[in-house]
Image (spheres, rainbow, N blue to C red):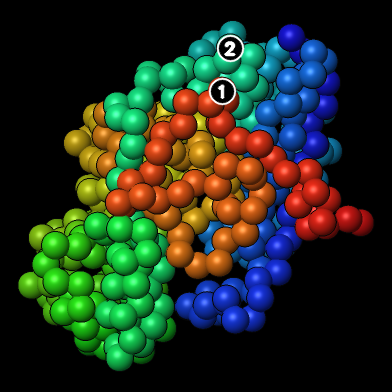
Amino acid sequence: MKIKSVRAEWIHVPIPEAQQHVSDFGRVTSFDCVLVRVETECGIVGYGEAKEEVGSSGNYRTLQAAINERLGPLLIGEDPRDISRLWDRMYNGTRDHYALARGRGFPILGRRGVTVSAIGGIDIALWDILGKSLGAPVWRLIGGRRAPRMPAYASGGWQDVARIGEQLAGYVEKGGFKAVKMRVGVIDGSARRSAERVRAARAALGGDVMLMCDAHGTFDVPEAKAFCRLVEDCDVAWFEEPVTADDRRGYAEVRGSTSIAIAAGESEFSRFDFLDLAERRCVDILQPDLAICGGLTEGMRIAAIASAYGLRLAPHLWTGATAFAAGLHLAAASSCGYILEYSLGANPLLHELVEESPEVSDGMVEVPDRPGLGLTIRPDFVERFAVRH
């Protein structure tokens, strides 16, 4: 089996105005990703996903070019089943022969950011190919699923203090969710106002629904600590990205000041970033986005770090269907896999890109037993929303 072609497409899907939401990232007017298609000479096709930034939108020309013009050509003629070797080849570039011979990394200078995201998109597609070639789901190949279904939480929660309770209660009613996440932080103007919204949410939800809060890294350390004090009696399941991802000391200080679990990881690239979070005792829950952090191969390494440090794994899944599926397979097979994110914002790349849109029933998502990632891409959707130059 040999790789015949590697092709990345920038998929840009406008969001109807009535379905747009506003957060600290601004008004979300589109959902974007790079869809990676890897085809073998024997006709097996695998799909992956890469993202240029955490938010829904972005400019993906550079990421697309990195795959089509730099990394993809390295893999033509290679066996797609040699996933670990191919990951190292992309990561180490022209010095990959040293890395393979000596058992340690000789990474290219651009070993974060776009390069790692591009590697991740290709890597996910290679796992899809491997599963399809063996007639097995990816979770079977990485250790087996621990249960046929996994719990999910509804991710959204942008409304003001008067309407946040109604919005979150609507999530619970819609999918039977037993856990929900709301946004807090700079968009509220102060820690006190964020706390007021959390209190309103808890009052509407009652005591049986898990409630998470996500600040998108927009508080400073004093604000984050104040917020935690103000909501400590609200039974917050976790506080996500309280401060900027670059402030490791700040993370550790916030975590040390509260009994609320701290979660982070969607802004991180590669296992080395996650190892730093674990070693500095910054977090309780790791949240890798496989379309950003290096794919499923790197995700398994991150899961091993989480397990070794007694942390939980809750992948960031504000993604398209391919990265969502990869995160689902990883969480289902990991001993520290905890819960899945299910975006309640408008997300056509999750629900319309593929024939098998993930559905929530009684707060649970099925772990599919179809080969590979278990997805069938809709070519007409790709053709309609691909950005052509």
Residue 20 vertical placement versus 139 (above, below): below
In the drawing, does residue 59 fall left or right of residue 144?
Answer: right
Quick check: can you spot residue 298? no
Three-letter code for the amino acid on which mark 2 is drawn = Leu
Discs 2, 1 touching: Cβ within 8 Å: yes
Q: Residue 115 is drawn in which quadrant?
A: top right
Where does residue 166 sit, x and y in percent of width and height?
31, 80
Amino acid type of the residue that numbered disc 1 sits on in the rendered structure? Pro
Q: Residue at x 29, y 73 (%)?
A: 169
The kind of secondary structure element at disc 1 is loop
Can residue 382 be seen from the camera position used here? Answer: yes
In the drawing, what numbered circle is on residue 332? Answer: none
Instruction: Check disc 1: other Cα within 10 Å, few if <14, some if 14-19, many if 20+.
Output: many
Residue at image location 91% in from the left, 56% down from the top: 389
Q: Examine the rendered structure and indicate whether residue 243 appears above or below residue 222.
A: above
Secondary structure type for disc 2 = helix
Residue ID at (68%, 17%): 80
In 3D space, how far apart are the residues under numbered discs 2 and 1 (Cα atoms)? 8 Å
Bin the neighbour count of mark 2 within 10 Å (Cα to Cα): few under 14, some 14-19, many 20 and up: few
Q: Which residue is mark 2?
A: 134
Q: Nearer the viewer, residue 338 or 206?
A: 206
Residue nearer the viewer, 382 or 38: 382
Mark seen at residue 371: 1
Q: Nearer the viewer, residue 298 or 345?
A: 345
Q: Position of residue 329 (x, y in %)?
A: 44, 32
Dot 2 or dot 1: first in sequence order is: 2
What percent of the width, then of the height, locates residue 118? 66, 41
Residue in view at x 73 percent, y 60 percent? 12
